[in-house]
Image (tube, rainbow, N blue to C red):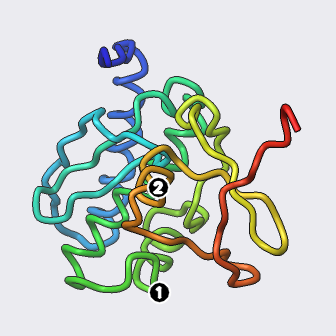
Amino acid sequence: MKPLRIPIALQQSVMQCLRAKLAQAEAYFDCTFPEPTITYQQRGTSAGTAWLERWEIRLNPQLLLENQQTFIDEVIPHELAHLLVFRQFGRVAPHGREWRWMMSHVLQTPARRTHEFDLTVVRPNTFPYRCGCQQHALTVRRHNRVLRGEAQYRCRRCGDLLQPETTTAGR
């Protein structure tokens, strides 16, 4: 798959937000932090990932292109908060009270754990599965793991084992 090109203006907006939020943290803690490396290599449905030891933020280029300013306003502070929490507190719960505090008090951004971006652009191939209460869409990777007998998945709501939906076409 060919890597997506992120327009330079969009990359500049990402860096502008990152630097502004980093400046807020530096003012709050009265110290300087190194600027994290930004890469556009995140795949799947995650908008971004903070690589703590590498001091790196990986962003999903497809979701960035689809959601531009909302993505920047939400994802950049979210991932930066993970790095700052690691630097200030060490390894703690990923979205625990330290992270929530960093988001709301230091970065002055609502502390939301997950994004609400439309995922159809990053999850085009899914397979229908069913439990006792609803339909689920499993990714190709999870579907193949079920087919090979390597994994089973359960519904978080009812606890039932997910079963592939059988098609009734031709019956």
Q: Position of residue 92 (x, y in %)?
A: 30, 86
As displayed, is residue 35 above or below residue 88? Answer: above
Number of on-image labels: 2
Q: Quadrant of the N terminus?
A: top left
Q: Position of residue 18 (x, y in %)?
A: 35, 44
Q: Earlier in the sequence, mark 2 or mark 1?
A: 1
Look at the numbered disc 1 and give the secondary structure of its residue: helix
Q: Which mark is residue 80?
A: none
Task: Give the quadrant of residue 124.
Answer: top right
Q: Please report the residue visible at 56 percent of the width from the left and 60 percent of the height from the top.
A: 109
Task: Give the quadrant of residue 130.
Answer: bottom right
Q: Quadrant of the C terminus?
A: top right
Left or right: 115, with 158 as reference point: left
Q: CA distance from mark 2 to mark 1?
A: 39 Å
Q: Position of residue 80 (x, y in %)?
A: 34, 57
Task: Give the quadrant of residue 149.
Answer: bottom left
Q: Which mark is residue 97?
A: 1
Left or right: 119, with 145 as reference point: right
Q: Nearer the viewer, mark 2 or mark 1?
A: 2
Q: Please report the residue visible at 55 percent of the width from the left and 66 percent of the height from the top.
A: 113
Q: Nearer the viewer, residue 136 or 146?
A: 146
Residue placed farthest to the front in the image?
Answer: 171
Q: Amino acid at mark 1?
A: Arg
Q: Amino acid at mark 2?
A: Leu
Residue under circle 2? 147
Neighbours of disc 2 within 10 Å: few (<14), some (14-19), many (20+)? few
As displayed, is residue 42 above or below residue 66? Answer: below
Look at the numbered disc 2 and give the secondary structure of its residue: helix
Left or right: 168, with 123 as reference point: right
CB atoms at circles 2 and 1 under 8 Å apart?
Answer: no
Neighbours of disc 1 within 10 Å: few (<14), some (14-19), many (20+)? few
Q: Please report the residue visible at 82 percent of the width from the left and 75 percent of the height from the top.
A: 132
